[in-house]
Amino acid sequence: MSFELLTVPCLSDNYAFLAHDADTKATLLVDAPEPEPIISKLKEKNWFLTHVILTHHHWDHVDGLSKLLEYYSPQIIGSSSDTKRLPPIHLPVGENDEIKIGNNVGKVFEVSGHTIGHIAVYFEESKLLFSADSLMALGCGRLFEGTAGQMWHSLQKLSTLPDDTILCSGHEYTETNSNFALTIDPKNQDLLTRHKKIKKLRSEGIPTVPSIMNEEKNTNPFLRPWCKEIRANLDMIEATDEEVFTKIRELKDEY
Ligand code: ZN
Ligand code: FE
């Protein structure tokens, strides 16, 4: 049986995710921004935390863990290349490794860019991709440690996943991302439609995460540096995809 997914808003704009396997009662948490909302969801659902995946070392993804460990003893999973900066990891993982949570098997992607050693995990049966601050709804993470080339390489790997993949990213940044996307891709009808939908959801306080891979492929400028209209708007018709991606990331940083 596939996971039951719960999105848990934390801090001002973070998301943690709980994924529960009813057959085995395994319950996975992806990232631990703050403990209280996570503990209250676990209690509400009567789920017992068995596994935690930490996507990267930033405080807003790991600082809630120590409090959770007062109540639960989950197996903690994180990047083998970043064990020095992450909290103590029981299961270090890297590119293409498999993670078993109950009957669900996840595949690890190494997606450096936002940090070096950021991981994303894809659970095929549930169609869930936990991408945190790599590929995000209408955006991608800022380049704190890696290069634009590394992030572009990371996003290309994730974009090979099926169109119906459910993208569980780490922050509610979608409205600003959408405003920015329209500045470089203003005639994209799918983007215009999505922009309206996002405005409405946010005005009602509803999360825009998770999103669907197909809509990212059609509207997220960071997956579309090949797009002729974007290239024309940036005056970069002859540039490589990586060069256009780099420019889009720079423009977003200044936006
Ligand atoms: Zn981060
Ligand atoms: Fe973050």
Image (spheres, rainbow, N blue to C red):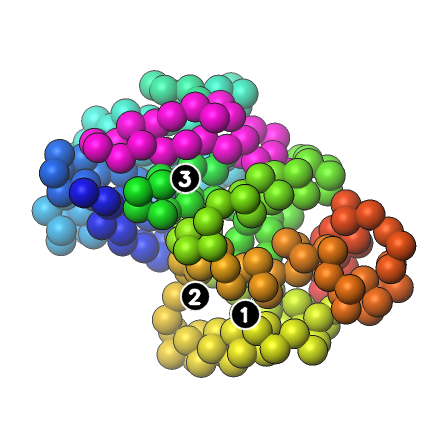
Q: Can you identify the residue that label 2 sits on? A: 208
Of the residues under marks 1 and 2, which one precedes in the sequence? 1
Of the residues under marks 2 and 3, which one precedes in the sequence? 3
Residue depicted at 53% across the width and 53% down the height:
136
Quadrant assignment, res 105: top left
> Start and end of the magenta stretch?
94-118
Residue depicted at 62% across the width and 43% down the height:
156
What is the crowding at mark 1: few (fewer than 14 residues within 10 Å), some, or many (at least 20)?
many
The stretch drawn in magenta includes residue 105? yes
- Residue 213 screen position, x and y as percent: 48, 55
| Above or below 255: residue 198 | below
Dot 1: element: helix
Please state which of residues 79 and 65 is positioned toward the viewer in this rendering.
79
Quadrant assignment, res 61: top left
Disc 3 marks which amino acid? Answer: Tyr
Dot 2: element: loop
- Residue 69 screen position, x and y as percent: 25, 30
Disc 1 marks which amino acid? Answer: Glu
- Quadrant for the C terminus in the image: bottom right
Residue depicted at 57% across the width and 73% down the height:
190
- Residue 72 screen position, x and y as percent: 19, 31
Quote the CA–CA distance across marks 1 and 2. 9 Å
Q: Can you identify the residue that label 3 sits on? A: 122
Quote the CA–CA distance across marks 1 and 3. 25 Å
Please state which of residues 28 and 71 is positioned toward the viewer in this rendering.
28
